[in-house]
Image (spheres, rainbow, N blue to C red):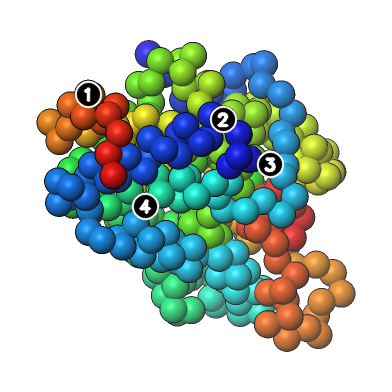
Amino acid sequence: MSGDHTSSAVSARVRSVEAFLESRGLLDDGEIDRRIDEFLAGGSPVNGARIAARAWVDPGFAERLLADANSAIRELGLTMAGGLQEQRLKVVANTVDEHNVVVCTLCSCYPIALLGPSPGWYKSEAYRSRVVRDPRGVLREFGVELPDRTRISVWDASAESRYMVVPRRPAGTEDLPEEQLAGLVTRKGLIGTAVV
Amino acid sequence: MSRINDVGGMSGFPPIAEEPDEPPFHADWEAHVLALNGALIRRGVYNLDEFRDAIERMPPEEYLAASYYERWFTAITALLVAKGVATADELDSPHG
């Protein structure tokens, strides 16, 4: 991908603008590399999975999480305040009657601190335009077939508000410890485009 | 009046394409663009809302033709000019 012509032209232009800004004192030496490293180290779906697993095993935590997620995730040492500004987090939980799915129709707002960098499909016009009009059909494309009686709620993220889904705990996992439960939770499950 | 980024509910887009084992960035320059934007916002050259606005007011045909991080870079360079940090000519000439 980086080898194609368009990409190498953009790449040269980005380098040139960086050099210009360095010459004007608007970028420090090594600042770009440091920020890239921080970004890549900053968030991962492991964080979201820990939250979901804790909510499964601890009803009190689940209640606090659904009421005030920004405060509740601090109990696990996580925060939504690590980026450019603190983002409001709302966590919604799937039930037998309701399935939740998250989108940002305007662009790409996403809880990076809890899920890491977002997948390309989340940022695509295809997902953004269609999941609000036909969530059931879009979920089917992801292999999620929901019974007709299950209501689907679509949460549209914004610059100030982020959303995360707690999937339903899979049947037959009653004896699993919290850590192994977290291992069952996927990024797509936390967005709502997978069952778990 | 909605702008081109406001695609919620719009018809005509294709099925969703998932990329297996997708990396966070598809080329180094994408990571550089992300870091550059963070650096400029933290320095107060512009703020996050101005950045979003700069993406959203791209001409529709340019917006749709651009990749995600190409949009970011378009917004960054537009803001550098709008804020008087650089002229368009300075950004167009090679540096470094």
Q: Marks 2/3: CA distance?
A: 43 Å
Cα distance, mark 4 to mark 2? 23 Å
Instruction: Write down the quadrant of residue A77 in the picture.
Output: bottom left
Looking at the rendered structure, whether the residues under marks 4 and 2 are on a common chain is answered as no
- Disc number at residue A5? 2
Mark 2 Cα shell of 10 Å, populated few (<14), some (14-19), many (≥20): few
Who is closer to the viewer here, A115 or B61?
B61
User: How would you rate the neighbour count of disc 4 (Cα within 10 Å): few for under 14, some for 14-19, many for 20 or more?
Assistant: many
- Amino acid type, label 3: Ile
At label 1, the amino acid type is Asp
In this image, A189 relative to B24: left or right? right
Give the class, few, some or many, for how many residues have Cα within 10 Å of label 1's Cα (few <14, many ≥20): few
| Labels 1 and 3 positioned on one and the same chain | no
The answer to whether residue A159 is left or right of residue A184 is left
**What subunit carries mark 4?**
B
Of the pair A73 and A31, the residue shown nearer to us: A31
Q: Which residue is mark 1?
A: B89
Do the residues marked 4 and 3 share a common chain?
no
Residue, disc 3: A152
Task: Judge whether A55 appears above or below A12 on screen.
Answer: below
Q: Chain of mark 1?
A: B
**Relative image position of residue B95 (x, y in whole percent):** 27, 39
Please give the chain letter of the residue carrying mark 3: A
- Crowding near the residue tagged with mark 3, few <14, some 14–19, many ≥20 C-alpha atoms within 10 Å: some
Picture residue at 76% right of the left edge, 55% below the top = A195
The nearer-to-camera label among 1 and 3 is: 1
Indicate which disc residue B35 carries: 4
Q: CA distance from mark 1 to mark 2?
A: 23 Å
Q: Residue at x 37, y 52 (%)?
A: B35
Nearest to the observer: residue A17 or residue A66: A17
